[in-house]
Image (spheres, grey):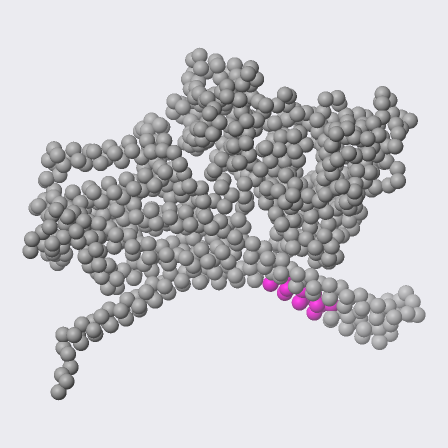
Amino acid sequence: MKRLSGHPFLGVSAVLRHELRLLFFAPLTYLFQAAFLLALNAFIFLVANFYGSDEATLRLMLVFLPWVSLVLVPALSMAAWTDSHSSREIELLYSLPVSPTAVVLGKFVAGWLLLLLTLLMTLPFVLTLTYLGEPDKGVILVGYLAAALFLGASFAVALFAGSFVREPVGAFVTGAGALFVLMLCGWDVFGRLVSDLLPQWAWESLVVYSPLKWSQVLGQGLIPAQALIYFLFTIGGSLLMAHWVMGERRRGGLKGLLRPDRIGAFAVVMLLWLFGIPLSERLPGQIDLTEAREFTLHAGTRGVLERLPEDTTLTLYWSATEDTIPASIKSHARRIQSLIREMAKVAGLDWVLVNPEPDSESELQALSQKIHKVPMSSGDHFFLGLTVEQGGRVGRIPYLDIRRESLLEYDLVQALSGLSRQSTPKVAIVSPLLPSSAALAEREGLSFMAELKRAYDVAVVPFFKTEIPAGIDVVILMGADILHEDMLYSIDQFVMAGGSLIVMIDPFSRVKRANNVTNPSPSEEINDISDLLARYGIVYEGDAVVGDAQLASIVSDADQGRLNYPYWMRITASDLSADHATTANLNEVLLVEPGAFRLEGGASALVTTTDNAGSALRGDFDRLTPRDLSMSFASQSKKRVLAATVQGPLKSAFGSAPDFSTAAAHRPNAVGMPLVFAIADVDWLFDPFSLQKTGLGQDTVVRPLNDNLAFMLNMLEFATGDDQLLAIRSRGQLHRPFSRVADLFQAAQAKAQEREAALAQQVGELEQQITLATQGVGDISYEDLPESVTLKLKEFESALLSARRELRVVRHSIRAEVDRLGKRLTFLNLLAGPLQVGVLGICVFWYRRRCTASMTAENHPVGTG
């Protein structure tokens, strides 16, 4: 037969059909698929304890997929180029009228289709995520794209590596070795292994050649052009070189690879791969499929950038040539530069990169601009900060801390926005919970102070002072239950002068129990801050602590394990005002045993409970355990307001200047539109309730647990008139937990509460019966009680023990039911893979048998007589 060599792609479909038949008619294929799925699910559910991760994402699948593929993908490709005495498949293929290119492409596409089909069989894992929580659909979609491209690249590389050897075992070893080297480039451990052999810049630059890196990037929901270029070049280059190797093998050996023309061709492909991938970083464009568009410049960012004057200049000080800087910091610096480039395109911003080398003029320039010289454990140091300048005004970020990586866009925009301000807003905090030094040095538990100081001139005013300092823009009162009457009047007149006021008031404080001795309460006279709020239309109801079983948080009871605690409320977007800029873009706020407000006049609610809120007296929280409080919780079928605001032409809380006032003039009415915020909680801002600190080597990483800090900063930015920044900080759900698990806790605990209430009623009835039975008996010992009374007591004791035993069973069932769900889901996911493979095998067997029967009937037709 004559080969049609002028058509290089002729016969791809024929080779593809042939390879698919070989794969799907071979029992080992189904063993491969079952092993692949079983291993992947075992790593996810057993090794990594997926059910305990409380994270409805594909992250664990993308973490373990590369390591499962490291073994099983070379196992799939190892027989592709077998050329032994027992198997002459390659010789047969090349004798057919198909091009060598068609052979390589056909084998690759067939194997990749099998891998994609196997990947499709992991959809039960996605169903599990959807069942347990609310995963980001865009991230899931791009995560599967990442997995598909990773498998394609791995199979192409394994095919190329295996093309050099004839034996299957040798092909497996070379394929696994090649994949391991590529994956090693993206593994942090690799850097530590070769740090003494190669310069840091050399081994750090290798990360772009690892499929691990790009699967992680895509797994976040972002599709950058560089990632697509990487997989295109890796797959295309591997297949092209595999085609050349097999062409030489067909001619009788691999010696032809040493020809100058062939060496040159290999060199061109490798150079294109080595230089094309890093250079593709400069290609514009990326697709952000995350629900919150977290990798796309926010509309608020664009608004700030578009109003920047044309002569604005940004200078980034970055020690790019310092070899000892950790890889994570260098990666952070690359992201900073990428974000600055995007901003420069929008605003026409001029930006300069300065490398402050030791003992150079550029280092002196950085120091003169007050950029921080960050020390390292090696004894060296580096710079990573920036300045923004316009018209003689200078703003700066002395250090772009990697711990604030999630707030990078906000920090940059805040620095740029500051150029348009005439002065830095001044904030006064009045609180017995904060020492005056809190405005100068960072203290444990007060991370929110560091956030305030980044954008505002903050002063802590002792709560015993008698007036607000001059020049203050915003006053924050935190747990300031007792204030001097002069201070109350000063605050009122501050608001009447157009100042903004943020009040945090709490019926029960966890942070400082001593503060619970007093409790503000509105009255006819002005005695505390609640009286001022009441005059402004926000009436504080602090005699009881508010809770809501539908918003309950899972907390740990030291004695009896985990429980749903309705007085720590995780308030989601449905109960946050969508009409006010401070809460419209928030996702979740945690309030800790708050009070409530009743609104009058023009006040509006910002944060509320559901319609099923309840409450408990504040005194109960000192003497009862969280479990007792939780079990005794009862819904009052009422919505409560937990945070509120009022803005408008307010009237002074003081009809006239009090006798003790020394003010020059009394303002009976507000100037302009003053703004008052009130939150019925104080604990919510402190670290345990708003931020999570995690040790990472020698560093401490701070991660927001919720939008508490964002809510606080939003109120400040709204109060100071800088509302362009409000929406940038909270750009989607911060965490996607297993909401069904929380619902199970809530439902199971509701059963326990019902039984507890029934038990309490039963105990009350029995006690009443005993009281009636012992009337007239007097104060005598148990042994002298009448027989009728002792029988009643025994019945009471028996009933009480039985009810308590049942209650313990119900409490135990709370955790047991959740654990059973986890075990069932683990078992179903482990079983789903082999079960799907079995169904596929049966279908293929039935199809093959039907085709065989049809061919037999055609070759041996039955006579008609």
User: Which residue of the protein is positioned furthest toward the bottom in this rendering?
Assistant: 865
Image position, residue 651 (x, y; %): 82, 34
Q: What secondary structure prevails in the magenta region?
A: helix
Examine the rendered structure and indicate whether residue 524 appears above or below residue 638.
above
In this rendering, does residue 290 appear at all? yes
Question: Is residue 688 in the magenta section?
Answer: no
Q: Is residue 10 left or right of residue 288?
A: left
Please report the residue visible at 27 percent of the width from the left and 44 percent of the height from the top.
Answer: 235
Examine the rendered structure and indicate whether residue 523 appears above or below residue 38.
above
Please report the residue visible at 88 percent of the width from the left and 37 percent of the height from the top.
Answer: 525
What is the total number of numbered labels drawn onto the structure image?
A: 0
Look at the image and give the residue range highlighted in magenta. 800-813
Image position, residue 819 (x, y; %): 53, 59
Q: Is residue 353 left or right of residue 855?
A: right
Q: State the quadrant of the N terminus.
A: bottom left
Examine the rendered structure and indicate whether residue 696 appears above or below residue 149.
above
Image position, residue 200 (x, y; %): 36, 28
Please report the residue visible at 61 percent of the width from the left and 54 percent of the height from the top.
Answer: 562
